[in-house]
Amino acid sequence: MNENKFIPQVLETERLILRPLTINDKDAIFKWAGDPEVAKYMRYPLYRSPDDATYWLTHIYETEKTLDYGFVFKVTGELIGSGGLIFDTEENNWTLGYNIRRDMWGKGIVTEACRKIIEHARNTYDVKKIVAVFAVDNPKSGHVMEKLGMKFHCDCEYTKWDGSESFKAKKYEIIFE
């Protein structure tokens, strides 16, 4: 187990508790990361067991500018998704990502969570730009970005981390003055 020093503070929205993820969240994470429909356009390969989350969860908070949260639905107390912002030192911008259980799609939960995370990042760090990428065959993810005020920047492509698949994509961004 790691000695994470940079654990983000807990945040709250109307329907969600946004909290740091822990190794104890493996089973809940598997509910979406092990779902072929949810994982289809994600960079990570489909999880085959809850243990596939171990490496990520033990290395997630190694830098200060990792604002990755578990989305806990207040009504049920269940961890239903995750997401946040990670600072890219090479590009000098923040990258947004998110993931949620399929039964929670279309409820505005990701938009609600990401709005709060962006607000927190802007109040805590000197955020100049946030970027995000979605597969063109997954336009609902692009709708989330638009609801967050992000605008189309360019067409691009990305590949799953294991090299198994590549996707035509669109890059969105928001620039803050």
Image (cartoon, rainbow, N blue to C red):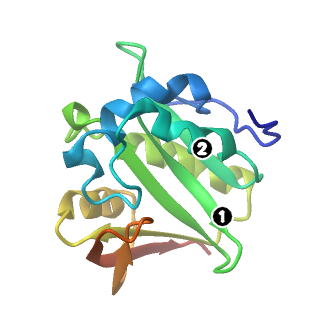
Q: Which quarter of the image is occupied by the N terminus?
A: top right
- Tags 1 and 2 in contact by the CB under 8 Å rule? no
* Whether residue 119 is situated above or below residue 131 in the rendered picture: above
- At horizontal 56% and vertical 37% (from top left) the residue drawn is 54
* Whether residue 21 is situated above or below residue 149 in the rendered picture: above
In three-dimensional space, the C-alpha distance between marks 1 and 2, rounded to whole angstroms, equals 20 Å
Instruction: Identify the image quadrant of residue 10.
Output: top right
Find disc 1 in the rendering and name its residue.
87
Of labels 1 and 2, earlier in sequence is 2
Residue 76 location in percent, x, y? Answer: 35, 12
Label 1 neighbour load within 10 Å: few <14, some 14-19, many 20+: some
- At horizontal 73% and vertical 37% (from top left) the residue drawn is 7
- At horizontal 73% and vertical 64% (from top left) the residue drawn is 126
User: Outermost residue toward the top?
Assistant: 76
Q: Which quarter of the image is occupied by the C terminus?
A: bottom right
Q: Nearer the viewer, mark 1 or mark 2?
A: 2
- Res 55 label: 2
Residue 89 location in percent, x, y? Answer: 71, 73
The three-letter code of the residue at mark 1 reads Phe
* In front of the other: 33 or 111: 33
